[in-house]
Amino acid sequence: MALTQSGSARDGWSSRTAFILAAIGSAVGLGNLVRFPAEAGANGGGAFVLFYIGCVILIGLPVLLSETLIGRHGQAAAPESYRRMAEQSGASTAWEGVASLGVLSAFLILSFYCVLGGWVLYYIGTFFFDIFNTGISGGAFAGVSVEEVEGIFPAMISNGLVTSILTAVFLGITMLFVARGVSGGIEKVAVYLMPAFFALLVGITIYGMFGGAMSQTVEYLFTFEPEKLTGPVMLAAVGQAFFSLSLGVAGMVTYGAYVGRNVNLGVTSGIIATADTSVALLAGLCIFPIVFAAGLAPNGGLGLMFQTLPHAFQEIPGGSLIGFAFFIMVGFAALTSSVALLEVPTAWVIDRFRFTRVVSVIMVAFGATILGVLSALSTGVMSGFHPLGFLPLFEGMGVLDTLDTFTGKLTMPIGALLTSIFVGWIANKRLIDSENGLGGALHLFWRFLVCWLCPIALTAILIVGIFPSLTE
């Protein structure tokens, strides 16, 4: 068990491997499985991919290490960890507000992320029952028209009762693991589900190599055309690298607080970033061979997962079984991410109010359920309710899209930007050097990135998010 600075026992990761798997699980989610392949295909293929990898190394990884070392040093919930480092650096304790913003972001994202998790549960059930109806030899949804298959998604999200129940169920599953603590619950999710996730991802990718249009996928994703690397494409790659690692939500600060002093954070952060990027690349190699083999166009966003892919599974041998395995895999990724999102505000409630873990989990989940149900209803009966529609950035958006935009374009970039400024310019260098696990030229390079490149890039993400017309 890790120890707080006062020496009191604190639940923590049982091993370095457990921390790495949990951190990977926190970062890997629907953004890797849906957003990256769509972004890569729509923004220049190989040029985008190579620039994205560079952004992960030069921007994502430095901020990831910054968040983790703050947590490990503070050995507390994210705001308290910031406060402790600020106090020991002779800086204002108001810097804890950066982590408080991250806690808020995690709570808001959790509320609508569980809606998407509920959608995944619906499709797991749909393909499970389809196996009994059509068997595993032919395509999925035998005898069902293409229009009906693609209509499953809009019919589902317009049914407020079904989506609300599924949201609550997914959040309930998340609660069960977080309520059991770090080593007894959260770690178990990571240790068992992440290897299973990778096995399914690799297995479906191998299936695509032999039964899908792999050569067309490779051409689609990795053809290098330098002329396509325009300003908007580069900003899209920077944004994808930032969001893929789940930065700015205090998640890595919270997970870092459970890490022992014997773990080299520089090395482990590199492993986490590499694994997360590998999942994003494999996701494209997993999804698009199936889509192209079915003769379909690769739609972007949620339509790719919930409409295009089910249609594609209808056209391929063993489609019901492959579809079931695919959505199980997606469910694993969604659960490991939701567990991390719930842990962030739960840890804050425990440290701030000294409630038990179970009580804290119930309190946070209750609030997230209320917002989650509102988000679920916003795609159906409450679609005409636009809570912040009077602001240009949120014009025409329902609750779910409003929360997504508010966190993705405002609170997360602001949190990551302030973190890089805090670590690069405010925190005591001796404290930072004692935690980051780097040395020599690598340490100097990391400090340059945190002090200069990361703030500039994150400021660009923030500005473009607020004023998207600047890239037109």
Image (cartoon, helix red, strand yellow):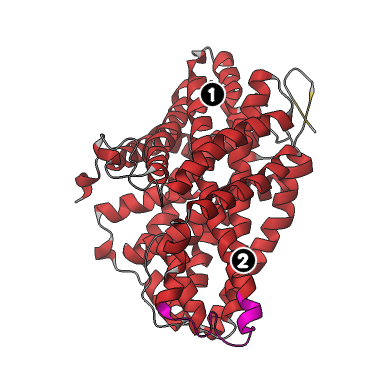
Residue at the disc numbered 1: 429
Residue at the disc numbered 2: 125
Q: Amino acid at mark 1?
A: Lys
Q: Is residue 372 magenta?
A: no
Front one among 244 and 104: 104
Give the Cα separation between the discs numbered 2 and 1: 52 Å
Main SS of residues in magenta: loop
Query: In this rendering, is residue 249 above or below 225?
Result: above
Residue 365 position by quadrant? top right
Query: In this rendering, is residue 96 above or below 365?
Result: above
From the viewer's perspective, is 403 left or right of 130? left
Front one among 134 and 357: 134
Q: Amino acid at mark 2?
A: Gly
Question: Could you say whether the residue bearing mark 2 is in a helix, strand or loop?
Answer: helix
Q: Which residues are magenta?
A: 130-146
**Counting other residues with Cα less than 10 Å from the Cα at mark 1, is it few (<14), some (14-19), or many (20 or more)?**
few
Q: Position of residue 350 (x, y in %)?
A: 68, 25
Q: Position of residue 369 (x, y in %)?
A: 56, 39
Badge count: 2
Which residue occupies 37% across, 38% down? Answer: 458
Q: Which mark is residue 469?
A: none
Which residue occupies 67% across, 29% down? Answer: 360
Position of the N terminus by quadrant: top right
Front one among 298 and 361: 361
Q: Is residue 138 magenta?
A: yes
Query: In this rendering, is residue 421 above or below 35?
Result: above
Which residue occupies 48% across, 81% down? Answer: 144
Front one among 58 and 232: 232
Note whether residue 13 is visible.
no
From the viewer's perspective, is 96 left or right of 308? right
